[in-house]
Image (cartoon, rainbow, N blue to C red):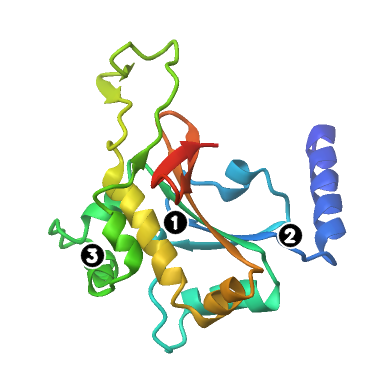
Amino acid sequence: MRFDDLAITLRRRARLTATSAARTPVMLFISCSDPRIVPTALTGAGPGEICELRTLGHRVPAYTGIAGAEAATIEQAVRGLGVGHIVVCGHSLCDILDLATEPDDRALAARGWMAAQHEESVPEDDLRDRVGRAPLPLRPDYGPDGMRFVGPRSVRRSATRHQPAYAHVLHQLGTLRTHPAVAEALEQERLALHGWFYDLVEGSVSAYEPGSATFVPL
């Protein structure tokens, strides 16, 4: 083993040892299982600072009373670890969102998982046609019409370009409220829910603001 490799290993071991006794996460971060999404990179968190729940399409099934991995993880984070925040983070270029309507015999389980969401109804669904993105300042790599050229593709910075994905994030915030642990913590004002959206092309993160029904850059 080279010296550099040994030093890196020792530093990593020191960090892990230091956090082994400390488990006081501030948030539960719910994101897609897409490998391009790295929660610790987006939040800057270290070991022990956030809980993670990763599901296909960052979907949070509504609570049914039947034990499941998602419900158990949410309950443990809120009641067991006392997190004060839950973030649902969606992202652009998510092909999984199309599986509910597009036939693909190679992804039957994934399609069924996403299609089940259509059987759920939450108040946040009423915002699906209104939610958008707050105006963004022009950047040098964008033209005055909001167009940006990325390789062979062009990307337009518009308020509604990601509207279906924004609405999907809001739906998960609604289904989160059906979980008893979440409803209880919200009523006691010791928990806050947040909707984030990660634009993979721009490398930007936006957060949902309920008052304006828009996602605003962080």
- The Cα atoms of the two marked residues, 1 and 3, are separated by 15 Å
Query: Which three-letter amino acid code belongs to the residue tagged 2?
Result: Gly
- Residue 69 coordinates in the image, percent (x, y): 49, 77
Q: Which residue is mark 3?
A: 111
Depth order, front residue of 103/189: 189
**Which residue is identified by label 2?**
48
Pointer 3 or 2: first along the chain: 2
Decide if residue 111 is on the left or right side of residue 24: left
Name the image quarter holding residue 57.
bottom left
The three-letter amino acid code for the residue at tag 1 is Ser
Which quarter of the figure is the C terminus placed in? top right
Q: Position of residue 40 (x, y in %)?
A: 62, 47
Residue 72 image offset from top left, x and y in percent: 54, 79
Residue drawn at x 49%, y 33% is 204
Q: Look at mark 1 in the image and give the residue it sits on.
A: 33
On screen, residue 174 versus residue 20, left or right, reads: left
Along the viewing direction, whichever of 144 and 81 lies nearer the viewer: 144
> In which image quadrant can residue 32 be found?
bottom left
What amino acid does circle 3 point to?
Answer: Arg
Give the mark nearest the N terminus, 1 or 3: 1
Classed neighbour count for the residue bearing mark 3: other residues with Cα under 10 Å, few (<14), some (14–19), many (≥20): many
Q: Is residue 75 visible?
A: yes
Label 1: element kind = loop
